[in-house]
Amino acid sequence: RDVHNATRVPFGVMIPVRVSHNQSIGPGVVPAGVDPAYDAQYANHKGPVAHVGANGFGRPFSVAPGPITHTQTPYVTGTTVLGMKYKDGVMIACDTLGSYGSTKRYKNLQRMRVVNAKTIIGFTGELSDFDYIMTLLDELNTNDYCEDDGKELSPKEIYSYLCRVMYNRRNKFDPLWNSLVVAGLMKDGTQFLGTVGMIGQHYTDSHLAAGFGNHMARPLFREKHTDDMSEPEARALMEDALRACVMRDKSMMNKFQIAKVEFGKAPTVSEPFAVATSWDYEKFKNPSEFAPGTW
């Protein structure tokens, strides 16, 4: 029998779904000889013999009948990304950890990339989804190169493009499980800094954070950040924010990188470094003092 043609036969002429069996063994999958009455009833049936799920949407012979679904659970993930403007440019920072669930699996993961001569990007969330996003951006860069007109996409154009990509995938109920931070310099010399989330929500600001850093780092930025601060001042504030995050976020590790785009210079991503931490606070010495029964 032509299998391809058989699959086009309308559902109405298929062998009816068996509903009396244990659902755990599959939707209507009853081997020949198990039920003689059932076999005799459809012995001369000429239609396809594949069964579908009890609700009519399952794949043939699938154990769990139902509609086709997309993966909605991230596997290898990164946490906080921070960003800020300063007098000479813009910088973003994050750690190098890729977590497999709650396991600190990959400890040398670079979660920031240089997009072109004016733009850098960092991500939180699923690693494989970010690799797909970078594939899209690489295609845009290739198109720019092939045009050979000396122009390339600005940070704002890349940011707008990613807003549409993320919102489009959200509308398909198959989102890219990432929050992105886009930073760079515009053609007129102004700094650009924006973030877009997994369902397309987005905003631009003088400082921002994606992930858990929204709760830990932005209060520090609001208190101390100014757009005209020098690069050493901006780096010191960034390290303070990273310290505040790593001491409170179990999915973060004390190994960071900072990426910068400065006027007249190519984008750079620093070598990994650690920030000074201290765990000898009074409340840390005996955390169960006022909580009897804990340890």
Image (spheres, helix red, strand yellow):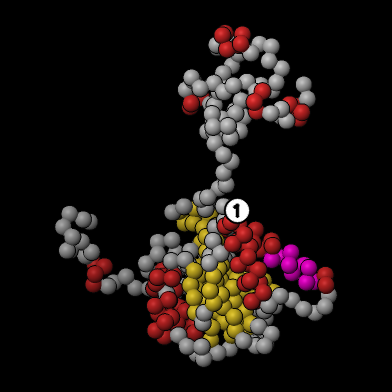
- Magenta residues span 137-145
Q: Is residue 272 left or right of residue 213?
A: right
x%, y% of residue 142? 77, 67
Q: Residue furthest front?
A: 12
Against 260, is 171 above or below? above
Against 57, is 253 above or below? below
Q: Name the residue: 57% across, 23% down.
A: 17
x%, y% of residue 233? 48, 87
Q: Name the residue: 77% across, 28% down.
A: 5
**Residue 27 visible:** yes
- Is 257 in front, or is 147? 147
Rendered-image quadrant of the N terminus: top right
- Is 193 in front, or is 57? 57
Quarter holding residue 224: bottom left
| Residue 230 painted magenta | no
x%, y% of residue 148? 83, 75
x%, y% of residue 212? 43, 66
**Residue 233 visible:** no
Q: Secondary structure at mark 1?
A: loop
- Is 264 in front, or is 72? 72
Q: Name the residue: 78% across, 25% down.
A: 2
| Residue 144 painted magenta | yes
- Is 210 in front, or is 56? 56
Amino acid of disc 1: Lys
Look at mark 1 in the image and give the residue it sits on.
Answer: 172
The count of marks equals 1
Q: Residues within 10 Å of mark 1 (few under 14, many from 20)?
A: few
Against 262, is 280 above or below? above
Most frequent secondary structure within the magenta stretch: helix
